[in-house]
Image (tube, coloured by chain):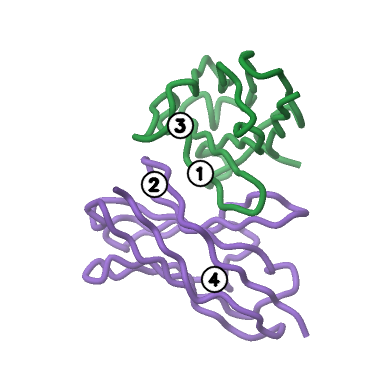
Amino acid sequence: QSVLTQPPSASGTPGQKVTISCSGSSSNIGIHYVYWYQQLPGTAPKLLIYRSNQRPSGVPDRFSASKSGTSASLAISGLRSEDEADYYCAAWDDSLNGQVFGAGTNVIVL
Amino acid sequence: QVQLVESGGGVVQPETSLRLSCAASGFTFRDYKMHWVRQTPGKGLEWLALISHDGNNKDYADSVKGRFTISRDNSKNTVYLQMNSLRDEDSAVYYCELDTLGHWGQGTLVTVSS
């Protein structure tokens, strides 16, 4: 059972906006940066968001993220077929003294 | 551009050892903490270890404490994971991760099987 809670799946049609939630606690998301990763089938997780809302160079601005209290969210606007992937959130946890992850959300483009 | 390249994975028998390496480039390696993380189909993503920028401080997940050792060589821009007493459940893809900026490598597969 993962420390961070994500919905197992999310879906949308091309062009729509999809939002993925990531729920944590005061020992992780509440006080630390959140990171988001995209994992296409058979590949390594790719960094999408760092420091809760920053995009690395090369990541389209269709991807955005926010954090409020002990929850975070990733939004994908203008959904495309190539966005079909698993998405993971991560944060450091002071109580566990380690990095914690969500179980991942599978995004399906209908 | 940040690049992390893991190596050293393979197929090994239980109770043997393996050392993974992660070569870093594109950033000032000695300024950053580094992590090791692994991924399995069954358990998902699991954080394993963290090393400070200078190598003086290390933290481990309970699942690997006493068996795995993280280390680094700042002169070679490389972080290592020494894995001893390997078990079937250590089979996974192992990734190194750059702290704060969050980049990961492409991973190296470790299979522990008799």
Seen in the picture, residue A90 relative to B81 is either above or below; the reply is above
Say what secondary structure mark 4 lies in: strand
- Marks 3 and 4, how far apart in space? 29 Å
Question: Which residue is nearer to you in this view: B91 or B2?
Answer: B2
Q: Which chain is purple?
A: B
Q: Residues within 10 Å of mark 2 (few under 14, many from 20)?
A: some
Q: Position of residue A13 (x, y in %)?
A: 71, 18
Callout 2: chain? B
Residue at x 32% of width, y 50% of height: B2
Q: Are marks 4 and 2 on the same chain?
A: yes
Q: Position of residue B66 (x, y in %)?
A: 57, 71
The residue where tag 2 is placed is B99
Mark closer to the chain start, 4 or 2 = 4
Amino acid beneath label 4: Phe
Q: Nearer the viewer, mark 3 or mark 2?
A: 3
Q: Which part of the image, by quadrant, shows the C terminus of chain A? A: top right
Say what secondary structure mark 1 lies in: strand
Q: Position of residue A104 (x, y in %)?
A: 68, 37
The residue where tag 3 is placed is A49
The residue where tag 1 is placed is A46
Callout 3: chain? A
